[in-house]
Every structure is written in structure tokens, then in C-alpha cells.
Image (tube, grey):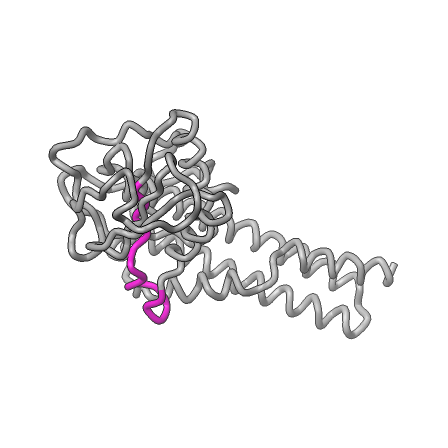
Amino acid sequence: MSAATAIISPSPFKPGRDYNHSDDREYKRLRDLANTEFKARSRYYDEAHAAYERGDGAEAKRLSEKAKEHAKKMDDYNAQAAVYVFRANNADSDGDEIDLHGLYVKEAEEYLTQRIAACKQRNESHLEVIVGKGNHSNGGVAKIKPAVEQLCKEHGFAYSLDGDNSGVIIIDFTKQGGYIPMSSMGHKPKHNFAQNGYHYPSPQRPQATYQPQYPGYSQAAQPQYVGHPQQHFQVENQQQQNQSPTDIFMFLFKCLKQCF
């Protein structure tokens, strides 16, 4: 399921307060459910491989199908978490901002690519991309920031870093050439960001004119949950470093063809 089409619980975000996904129980619940499915998927893959090694092709096929089921559930829960946190983080964004906090790298790339396409279509001059400083990432190393910089380089977008907030990248659509000094940028950052890397609405600017479209969703009871946010970024590492379901399924399919 794509993050853009996920069905989610309503966001608890209320304008007037600054949202922090690391404190959101529903966000952590969805990521933990995805992690549970990830572990089940990995276990069934290992068992399928072991079955193949001992010559039991039928059992290997059955186990690989179970792994596929858990892989789909993992993707669904991650997509729900992505839509949930993106909606909450951007509820108070200015019209020239996009906040990617709380997204995994691939999710952030998907949302940013869609937003850039919308900016280009409307002939907008710039976009402020809130990527965070990596404070919640495993080891404190930022992941979204270098991915956004790489995306800008690949597409030839001019971009610069906010000198007063390292968690903000400004993309200038009126120029080309990759990274340029802030002094050469046509747009200057508004500097309306909180010290913790999250932003407050700019009082002198209208609220966001860009409104991502979400499908209808039903009210869901919010379970009580307590967890540590650092776990979710460690999970992202594990999920992205492992082989994709497609790669493993193709391997098993080739093996099974030799058995039948």
C-alpha cells in the first residue's frame, strides 16, 4: 500500500500546538505493528530457506507465501504511519513548506517528489523542506537530509541549507546547479522554527495552500501505548537493509521451479 493511499486513524493534531511525532502513541503503535510483521516475515523467509535446503519444496513454497502475507501487512502499517505523521506535521505548515519529520527515507522521498511536482506545475519559486537534524535517528545521524540533497542533485535543483537551522533545506526552482550558498538564493528562510527542530506557523503568512489529498477514514479507538522512539529508527535500518520481498520471492521461485 502506498503511503499516499493508506487509510489511517484521524490525526490528534490541533492547530496552536507544536506536534512531535516521538510523543505520539498512535504513530508509535503503527510503527511497532509494522516491526512485528517485519520480524514474522523474516522468520518465515528463514524457515522457507531451511525447507528448501533440506529438499522440501512444497513446505518452502508454503512458508514463502506466509512471508509474503506478513510483508504486505508490514507495508500497510508503515504506510498508515507515514500518512498519519505527515498529516499531523503539515497541518500548520506555511504554503511554501513541507515537513518530513517522522517519515522513513523512502517515504520522505515519495512525499517530496509529489510535492515538487505540484510546485513545478504551479510555477512556485521555492520550497522549504524541513528534514530535521537527525536527533531521533539511530546514532544521531541524519538520514532524510542527505537523501533530499541527493534528490536535488539528481534533478539539478538549486538548493541551500538554512544557516540558522541545519534541519531545513531550501530548494530554489528558479535556479539550477545543485548546492549554492544561501547568499545566492532568491528566497531567504523565514526563521520561524522552534529550537527542537519543529516549526511554528509563521504569523505573517497565510496557512498552507498545498493540501495533500487523503481518502476517507473511520474513527478508531486510540490504544494506550508506551515505547521508546529510538526503536523505530533502528527498525527502519533493519527493514531497509534486508532484501526486498520481490528479490527473495524471485529467488525462491527459481528454487521451487527446480523442485517441481
Q: Is residue 117 above or below residue 143?
A: above
| Residue 76 visible in the picture | yes
Furthest-front residue in this view: 184
Q: Is residue 224 above or below residue 97?
A: below
Residue in view at x 42 percent, y 36 percent: 116
Residue in view at x 41 percent, y 67 percent: 234
Q: Is residue 216 left or right of residue 136?
A: right
Q: Nearer the viewer, residue 143 or 173?
A: 173
Q: Position of residue 26 (x, y in %)?
A: 31, 50
Q: Is residue 153 left or right of residue 171?
A: right
Furthest-bottom residue in this view: 54
Q: Is residue 252 above or below residue 123?
A: below
Residue in view at x 58 percent, y 65 percent: 42
Q: Is residue 55 left or right of residue 30?
A: right
| Residue 26 visible in the picture | no
Q: How many marks?
A: 0
Q: Nearer the viewer, residue 135 or 188?
A: 188
Using the rendered view, name the quadrant where residue 46 is placed: bottom right
Q: Position of residue 126 (x, y in %)?
A: 33, 36
Instruction: Specify start and end residues of the magenta stretch as a single range.
Output: 128-141
Q: Nearer the viewer, residue 51 or 124?
A: 124
Image quarter where the C terminus lies is bottom right
Q: Position of residue 214 (x, y in %)?
A: 39, 32
Is residue 136 within the magenta segment? yes
Using the rendered view, name the quadrant where residue 14 is placed: top left
Q: Position of residue 21 (x, y in %)?
A: 28, 52
Q: Nearer the viewer, residue 245 or 162?
A: 162
Residue in view at x 33 percent, y 32 percent: 125
Is residue 105 within the magenta segment? no
